[in-house]
Amino acid sequence: MRILVTGNAGSGKSTVSKQLATNYEITCYSLDKVVWQENWHKTPQKEKDRLINELIAKKDWVIDGVSNKILEAADQIIFLDFPRRVCFYRAAKRNTRYLFSSRPELPANCPEILIIPTLFKIIWNFPKKARPELMKEKSRRNDSFIQIKNNKELRAYLSSVR
């Protein structure tokens, strides 16, 4: 079982991924640890590609993040397609909690305060930049693609996989 949980920043990818990994008793990986290095430095592309290849070579996984290569390798895609206002709210709530420290799924020394402007740009631009590719993938892989647009749909989905 190879599951990609994808969506905008602040959509709940990490939370949903952890729940799915627990339900299916498989390992959960966060792309944040692949994309970012200590102090919010981006991982060089060659190293990032190597790390992604190592992840997708594993037999079973739940991976949270946005990656075309992982999208292609996944057996199932869960797309958390929440409105931007929800993502902004959730990101702000999370940022408050980890304002001066790193979230557990991030490398060391990545406090949220240093990424806030970038994070808000990512959230704002997601519908134009990343969503169209995901919608193409949905039409191509309808059976293995689950689009979740609100909390009611998310609760129903998580109840169905318990």
Image (spheres, grey):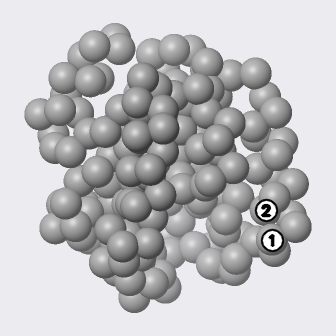
Q: Residue at x 16, y 44 (%)?
A: 150
Look at the numbered discs 2 and 1 and tell me whether their residues touch, using CB distance below 8 Å.
yes
Can see residue 113? no
On screen, residue 147 versus residue 62, left or right, reads left
Q: Residue at x 81, y 74 (%)?
A: 44
- Residue most extreme to the front: 140
Q: Which mark is residue 48?
A: 2
Residue matched to label 1: 45
Q: Which mark is residue 123?
A: none
Can see residue 50? yes
Which of 82/17 is in front? 82
Kind of element beneath mark 1: helix
For the residues labelled 2 and 1, the Cα–Cα distance comes to 5 Å
* Horizontal and vertical percent position of residue 139: 40, 40
* Horizontal and vertical percent position of residue 94: 32, 62
Kind of element beneath mark 2: helix
Q: Which image quadrant for residue 93?
A: bottom left
Which of 60/149 is in front? 149
Q: What is the quadrant of the N terminus in the image?
A: top right
Q: Residue at x 19, y 23 (%)?
A: 156
Residue type (three-letter) at the residue carrying disc 1: Gln
* Horizontal and vertical percent position of residue 111: 50, 75
Q: Residue at x 53, y 52 (%)?
A: 65
* Horizontal and vertical percent position of residue 154: 23, 33
On screen, residue 122 versus residue 68, left or right, reads left
Please rate how many residues cluster around mark 2, counting C-alpha atoms within 10 Å: few if below 14, some from 14 to 19, many from 20. some
Query: Where is 90 relative to 99, above or below?
Result: above
